[in-house]
Image (cartoon, rainbow, N blue to C red):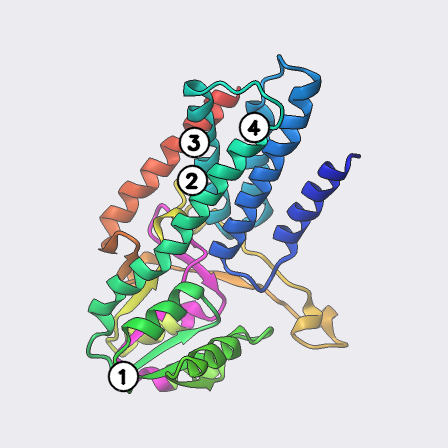
Amino acid sequence: MSRKTEAIERAALKIAGDKSSGAAQLAVLGLDLMAETCAAVSVNQTDNQAADPLPEILNMVRRIDGLRPSMAAPGNWALMFYAGFRERLKSEPISEPGGLGALGLEIADSMKARIASHAGRMAGAAGTILRDAERVITLSYSSSVEEALKTAAPEGCEIIVAESRPLLEGRRTVERLRGAGREARCVTDAEVGLFMREADALLIGADTICRDTAAVNKVGSLPAALAARRFGKPCAVISDTFKISGRLTAADVVLERGPGEEVWPGSGDICENVTFETIPGDLITCYVTERGIIAHHLIREEAERWRRLWETARLNGE
């Protein structure tokens, strides 16, 4: 195995095993992996100028898509990388050594810049929901939610964050918000319903939005959404459109699990540790995206677009 191949394998394992990063961060790692794959293919091109690089690159798209089954974003961004790479090769055939690697790096950098721009655009859209809020509830950790709360919640708004057992990602959210001068407090997951009574809104992230408009997020999101419905509070999901799946429904999602030892050290064999769950679309008031606040029918339209893109990629790879 070459050094470059070894590096690719390490990068793939990192994405599969990273339980602290969100979907957007893992999508960035996936784009780096796509660029590394192009560089590896570029080396092969030196040995065989007639080799078609696209099948190997498409295979990596499929692999990235399967590394984190509860997250649509890494696969969707990898798919768009492939589509852009394929179109560039059509218009600008590359023959010089290292050319494919350079093109892959260029496309990856451009797409990572797009990912970075989405947080600010979603935060701007969230302003409509947060403008007059005096208390907002969230849970776990989401870079998109963090940015929205930092920049769009009014001064003095109290932000209640559920700690999100067993890895307690919510504490990181509290620390980062307080470090930015926001009034944030941590509660146990079991207290969410209690505090929802006095909240103005529930704002959560998503790792995937299914084609039936259900959202996949850290476990604890469903009880929070049910509490919001019970007390008549809006439940907004903040997520860019690259997290929309055109293939999955809530019934199809493979929910990732962690080791039982995370729940109860020394007694992991008697513990369940499902880390993600689905929130039905009828519990979600709206979706805050880089395109603004959108309703359920637009999620379905975008899901159909993603379905067609994946189908086209499948046919091109046959």
Kind of residue indicated by mark 2: Arg
Front disc: 4 or 1 = 4
> Relative to 241, does residue 125 appear above or below in the rendering?
below
Distance from label 2 to label 3 (Cα)? 21 Å
Is 317 in front, or is 27? 27
Front disc: 4 or 3 = 4
Distance from label 4 to label 2 (Cα)? 30 Å
Kind of residue indicated by mark 3: Gly
Q: Which residue is mark 3?
A: 84
Which mark sits nearer the N-terminus, 2 or 3? Answer: 3
User: Magenta segment range?
Assistant: 195-223
Residue occupying image coordinates x 51% and y 50%: 28
- Lateral position of residue 205 relative to residue 46, left or right: left
Is 14 in front, or is 234? 14
**Dots 1, 3 in contact, CB < 8 A:** no
Residue occupying image coordinates x 43% and y 83%: 178
For residue 206: magenta? yes
Mark 3: few/some/many CA within 10 Å (<14, 14-19, 20+): some
